[in-house]
Image (cartoon, helix red, strand yellow):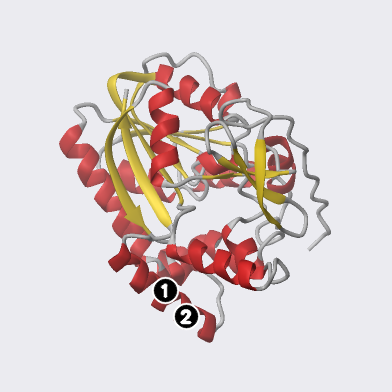
Amino acid sequence: MAKIEINLTKRDACPYCGSGLRKVLFALERYSVCRCKSCKGVFSDPYLSEKGAEKIFSEPDSVGVINTEVESYYDREFVLANSRHTFKVFDWLLDFLEKNVSGRKLLDVGFGMGLFLEKSRRRGWECRGIDFSDEYYKYAKETMGLDVMKKKISEFTGYDEEFDVIILWDVIEHLDDPGETLARLRGMLKPGGVLAIATPNEKSLLAFLAKFIYVIGFGLIKGPLSSVYVLEHPLFFDKKSLRKLLERNGFDIVLSKQDETDIERLNLGKLKKIIVKIIFFLSRSMRMSNRIIVIAEK
């Protein structure tokens, strides 16, 4: 794999509210995790911008360049063979949407491997997807025959009140300006249309344990915390902060649900996988799982 340079961008203000006041929570190797003193939003500084991420992930064989444990997470054949949880969650979401949304026109923003688009199409949805990755676009278009476009959100225009449902699956945590993006997507939804978001949970049990290790190690043990506040995610949400952001941008929350990373998709050693499974088991009982799904209505 060719060496890929990762450049981070310094922030001048909070990406949620524009305030210049922040508190540094944790100092990691290349960046700090900060909390805005005004809106309490959590973000990294310096951060991997959308432009920086596009440059990295447009390169061939870029998956795993930041974190080798996620290489299998984006291996389509591996996921199809091993990831029951991923598809169980997809079915749950589609079941919910089919019961609660009258139309069947769906936009998947950042469709990635096209797994959700493919399943939605099989269930009768009229699906369209956008993604900036040339590799994902070509595969989805040429091999899978999906209705997709190679575009960033900012380039996707001319679709006012077009869609019944918009999906942001592991996307919102990568954005430069989440408020501006949500406002743009809201304009693309029909009246009563639904936005579904899935993202890591900053208030998970896994995050709590990583913070505890960082604190008792006097900030010297950074590894566990770096696995929670990952370099490629410049924004970090919990259920409350995501709800606040959505409501500020004109959405009404319909449902919030806890979820967890599909551990079978991760390239973990046996011992680490056992430890994570135990933590996930405890997380479910404590309602502190490491992912959240929020559904909001226009």
User: Could one spot residue 71 in this view of the protein?
Assistant: no
Quadrant of the rendered image containing residue 185? top left
- Residue reaching furthest bottom? 271
The one nearer the camera, 138 or 188, is: 188
Q: Helix, strand or loop at disc 2?
A: helix
Viewport quadrant of the N terminus: bottom right
Q: Residues within 10 Å of mark 1 (few under 14, many from 20)?
A: some
Viewport quadrant of the C terminus: top left
- Residue at point 36% right, 15% down? 161
The residue carrying mark 2 is 275
Q: Amino acid at mark 1?
A: Ile
- Residue at point 31% right, 65% down? 286
Against 70, residue 95 (above or below) is above
Relative placement, left or right, of 263 versus 92 is right
The one nearer the camera, 123 or 218, is: 218
The residue carrying mark 1 is 279
Percent coordinates x, y for residue 224 in the rendering? 61, 69
Percent coordinates x, y for residue 14 in the rendering? 63, 32
The answer to whether the residues at label 2 and label 1 have Cβ atoms under 8 Å apart is: yes
